[in-house]
Amino acid sequence: MPAHRSNADRARAAILLLDLTDLADDHSAAGIDRLCERAAEHQVAAVCVWPEHVPRCVELLADSGVGIATVVNFPQGNQQVGKVLEETLTALSDGATEIDVVLPYKMFRNGDIKPTAAMIEAVGDLVAPPGILKVILETSELPEAAMVRSAAELAVGLGADFVKTSTGKARGGATLDAARVMLEVIADSDRTVGIKPSGGVKTFDDAMAYLDLAAEVLGDDWAVPATFRFGASSLLDALLVQIEMGATPESNG
């Protein structure tokens, strides 16, 4: 996203990249209704909700153009493969268009690469195009940049459409250092792969830092909804404030 644009214009463009999220422990039907209302109003890329809310989102967002993402193997990444596949099939049957699956990061961290890969590959086999597969690396649980790189390379090699930094439930969230490594892996790929910073991306400045980094690594025009998402619950409000601030001088004449 070109940095010479006004902050208000940059905020408007960032809204289109949002996976507007409600994965709160105290999630409610009323909260999901409000989430979908705001998603449709502001034309975000997608909503991201717990699996049980997918049918309601399908109902509320019909013909809106907003995608419906849900999470599996979430948040600890340690479910049995059969359970994860069952969750995935149910979500897709209910109308989810995007699946965010947690990499079995503890297994991966311990060097158990084959079973880690088997789970991601099995989920990916269920998410046929135009479905979108996002693999959550939980980068704060991967202690070295080399391990983040290896996890991203594994996910990309297994067909992930996006690599995502975090669940938002671990001790740490997205970082620019991890995102840079992931973007470098994407740059080296021979196909289109996206990135989803998630976990702690709350302010306009937070969002712009990730977009500026993506522009540095992959070019000014690279970040579009097909290649870049923000996973966030409160970022929309911050972006709307920035737009309102940009409009204030004109409105005051």
Image: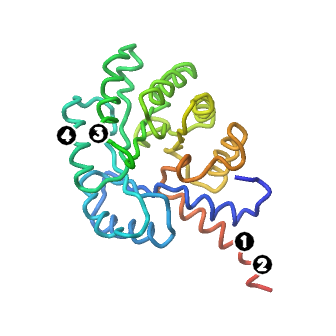
* The quarter of the displayed image where residue 8 is located: bottom right
Cα separation, mark 2 vs mark 4, equals: 53 Å
Front label number (2 vs 4): 4
Q: Are marks 1 and 2 in contact (CB under 8 Å)?
A: yes
Label 1 amino acid? Answer: Gly
Q: Earlier in the sequence, mark 2 or mark 4?
A: 4
Reading the image, the residue beneath label 4 is 86
Q: Earlier in the sequence, mark 3 or mark 1?
A: 3
**Lateral position of residue 166 relative to residue 187, left or right:** left
Q: Earlier in the sequence, mark 4 or mark 1?
A: 4
Front label number (3 vs 1): 3
Give the percent coordinates (x, y) of residue 43. 50, 67
Cα separation, mark 3 vs mark 1, equals: 44 Å
Label 4 amino acid? Answer: Glu
Front label number (3 vs 2): 3
Please give the label number shown on residue 126: 3
Give the percent coordinates (x, y) of residue 236. 53, 62
Q: Decide: few, some or many residues near mark 1? Use Cα within 10 Å; few <14, some 14-19, many ≥20.
A: some
Q: Which residue shows up at 27% across the image and 58% down it?
A: 53
Q: Which residue shows up at 60% across the image and 55% down it?
A: 203
* The quarter of the displayed image where residue 246 is located: bottom right
Cα separation, mark 3 vs mark 2, equals: 51 Å
Please give the label number shown on residue 246: 1
